Image: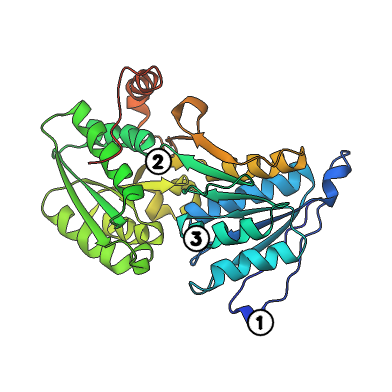
Amino acid sequence: MRKNARLLAASIAALSLFAAACGGDDSGSSSEVIAGIAFDTGGRGDGTFNDSAATGGERAASELGVEIKELEAAVDEDRKANLELLAGDGAQVIVGVGFMFTDPMTEVAAANPDIHFGIVDSVVDAPNVSSLLFAANQGSFLVGAAAALKSESGQIGFIGGQEIDLIKAFEAGYTAGAKYVNPDIVVNVKYLGPAGDNSAWGNVAGAKEIAAGWYAAGADIIYTAAGGSGAGTIEAAIEAGKWAIGVDSDQYLTSGDEAAQAVILTSMIKRVDVAVFETIKASVNGDKSGGIKMFDLSNDGVGYSTSGGYVDEFVDQLEEIKAKIVAGEIEVPSMP
């Protein structure tokens, strides 16, 4: 039976590392492997990105018998410190969840060449770092197509977090997918903050205000790629009786709220859980090589959800589009 434990770093001085002991299967050797997961600010409970990473760690504990240690950044300075704390506490593999770990991991990985690191949504050019990248533009193309197929008004929207290339890929794919289905569809676009504005990932009120305005003006579906800010779009959708599209995880399932489930049309699934699990598994199997690991439609690293049944009538069309993307017949843009 697996027993999970979580370490929350509210401040570096107050940290007290502890671990979850995992009863494994009969493999035995993996029980000696310690895997660390360093969450960014916000961490567990966001219902999307970080929770997906946590699921990957839980799967590793259950299936591989590894010991999982988790740290969560409370402030920016915690990122490097948490990586160092995990390294010092015996972790043989450490995953940093999010591009904000790029600079800290570059330093910590160089100082710990015998530890295997993984970073989500960024590239660290080091022999012991696996850069875990996702073709979010491809998954976003599919939910954009779903939005265009479902929309009755011919007007939809996209709300991004920070206006950076990573999130622009979501916008580009979404808009392209919608216009592939309906060239005349109107796609409203707005970002919650410029590059470097970390409040953009937790600006629930800001997302709600934008979404409410668009719904009132005629948009009937809005896709938000802005971390925890997306809760604001869902709130606005509930109040307006319109649709929202989730991101990273299947937010229909993670919301746990009937009102939210009634308005979440679909979600763009980014399998951060698979990336985290595969990185830990590689270390358990003795493979600590770095390099870029791409998760896209061809390996189901991204996709769309069907929970709720709201896009069931379009699944055949969406699967046909997916097949064309995988075959290279549709080229999905990564920038607007």
Callout in the foreground (1, 2): 1
Callout 2 secondary element: strand
Q: Given contact means CB atoms under 8 Å apart, are the residues at marks 2 and 3 in contact?
A: no
SS of the residue at dot 3? helix
Alpha carbon of mark 2 to alpha carbon of mark 3: how far?
28 Å
Write the residue at 26% across / 37% down: 147
Q: Earlier in the sequence, mark 3 or mark 1?
A: 1
Q: Secondary structure at mark 1?
A: helix
Query: Circle 2 sits on which residue?
Result: 268
Classify 10 Å Cα crowding around label 3: few (below 14), some (14-19), many (20 and above): few
Name the amino acid type tagged 3: Asp
In this rendering, is residue 203 above or below 310?
A: below
Residue to which mark 1 is pinned: 14
Q: Amino acid at mark 2?
A: Met
Q: Nearer the viewer, residue 104 or 136?
A: 104
Compared with 105, 168 (above or below) is: above
Q: Residue at x 61, y 71 (%)?
A: 81
Residue flagged by tag 1: what amino acid is it?
Answer: Ala
Left-right relation of 275 to 289:
left
User: Upstream in the sequence, badge 2 or badge 3?
Assistant: 3
Mark toward the start of the polypeptide (1 vs 2): 1
* Position of residue 311 measured from the top left corner of the image (x, y, whole percent): 35, 32
Q: Which residue is mark 3?
A: 103
Instruction: Pick the residue in front: 304 or 57.
Output: 57
